Image: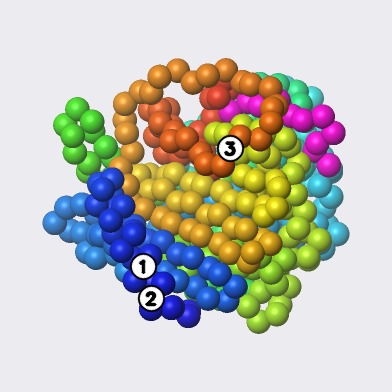
Amino acid sequence: MDIAPAARDDLEERLDTLARKHGVPGAAAGVLAGDEMTVCATGVTRDDAEGVPITDDTLFLVGSITKVWTATLVMQLVDEGRVGLDDRVNSHLDLPLQLADQGVADTVTIRQLLTHTGGFYGDREDPPERGDDALLRAIASYADLPQLHRPGQLFSYCNAGYNVVGRLVECLSGSNWDDALRERVLLPLGLQRTSTLPEQAMVHPVAIGHDLDLAEKKQTPVTVWCDSRAAGPCGGTLAMRAADLLAFAKMHLRDGQGPDGTRVLSPQSARLMREPQVAMNDPVMGLAWGLGWEIGRVDEPVVVGHGGNTNGQMALLFRVPERSVAITNGDATARSTTRCPPTRPPVPNRAPHPAGRPTRCRTSAARRRARPGARTQSPARWTREKGAGDGR
């Protein structure tokens, strides 16, 4: 990993200043510009006597950024000709998806699941499964998930949908999602420390998330480090260093080419993932959504990314393909357990919002993941009208 000393010092000073200002126990950040990567860290792994200094090698949970990794696995299957984006997902599952509206379950497509337009409720608490069949059992629990809107008509952030496409990966690859991710993405990228299982992560230094109690004005380390294995594909278990996340971003910046020249994705699939599929024009959710990627800017230079928030940890990844630049950060920050004011109703598509995103408050229902990249869904907040002509 190439580190420019001057750039690192500047980034480290900024990170340290911001962490102290906002009361963040520990954080890591990184910038990739071309082939030059700069990574730094500050603070401690947990805000108590057991905390140790965070280093460049500390692992952070990345939350819903995992969805881009799951979408990458699906696009590999597309490259192999084993699946089409507009195939009905049930045509490839060994145990068909069942929903409260079985007509939707039988017709919802892979593209609709990847773009959060499947329309069914997506925030069922995942069962506490640890076996290789954890995802199978999770999908089997979806039979009573209600329909919020017709598939393909609206955007409604759906974690359950990404678990379904994770199960699709299992059925077509012949292995569980954890092994498929390791064999198809982690190993080709040389990411030896990145893991989806806590027993693998715990042999490395890991950051611990924190809960925030506003009444007591203090934050405490969480008592559960990650989510159930059943939540893997949508963002509950994947942990890595900042440098590892930038290595994944670099592969996408190179249109699917790995560090040794090996193809992880075809150029066509890598580019398609960042092309708008659903128009958003919403300052909270970005201007559009691709296949896994949130699109924050559609004019040149295009900016795509994703965020994650899980078990008291937050992460962000942004990349600018035309400039070969990617930026990431992760922190073991506290999460509020208080309620926020009611969210506003859906708004129609409108002109792009000026650059910048407002700060979003996290409701108690969103205690694990908040947008961007959240695993939390409120029909009033996350349902957005799909733009005419989008979705292909």
Which residue is identified by label 3? 354
Q: Is residue 254 above or below residue 290?
A: below
Identified at 35% across, 44% down, the residue is 312
Q: Between 13 and 291, which is closer to the camera in this rendering? A: 13
Identified at 13% across, 56% down, the residue is 49
CA–CA distance between discs 1 and 2? 6 Å
Identified at 59% across, 51% down, the residue is 305
Q: Amino acid at mark 1?
A: Asp
Q: Is residue 140 above or below residue 307?
A: above
Ranked by sequence position, the earlier of labels 3 and 1 is 1
Which residue is identified by label 1? 10
Cβ atoms under marks 3 and 2 closer than 8 Å: no
Task: Answer few, some or many: residues within 10 Å of disc 2's Cα (few below 14, many 20 plus, some between 14 and 19).
Answer: few
CA–CA distance between discs 3 and 1? 28 Å
Q: Is residue 388 above or below residue 243?
A: above
Specify the label residue 6 is tagged with: 2
Secondary structure predominantly adopted by residues drawn in magenta: loop
Is 222 on the left or on the right of 303, as rendered?
left
Cβ atoms under marks 1 and 2 closer than 8 Å: yes
Image quadrant of residue 346? top right
Is 137 on the left or on the right of 43, as rendered?
right
CA–CA distance between discs 3 and 2? 32 Å
The boundaries of the magenta stretch are 382-392
Ranked by sequence position, the earlier of labels 3 and 2 is 2
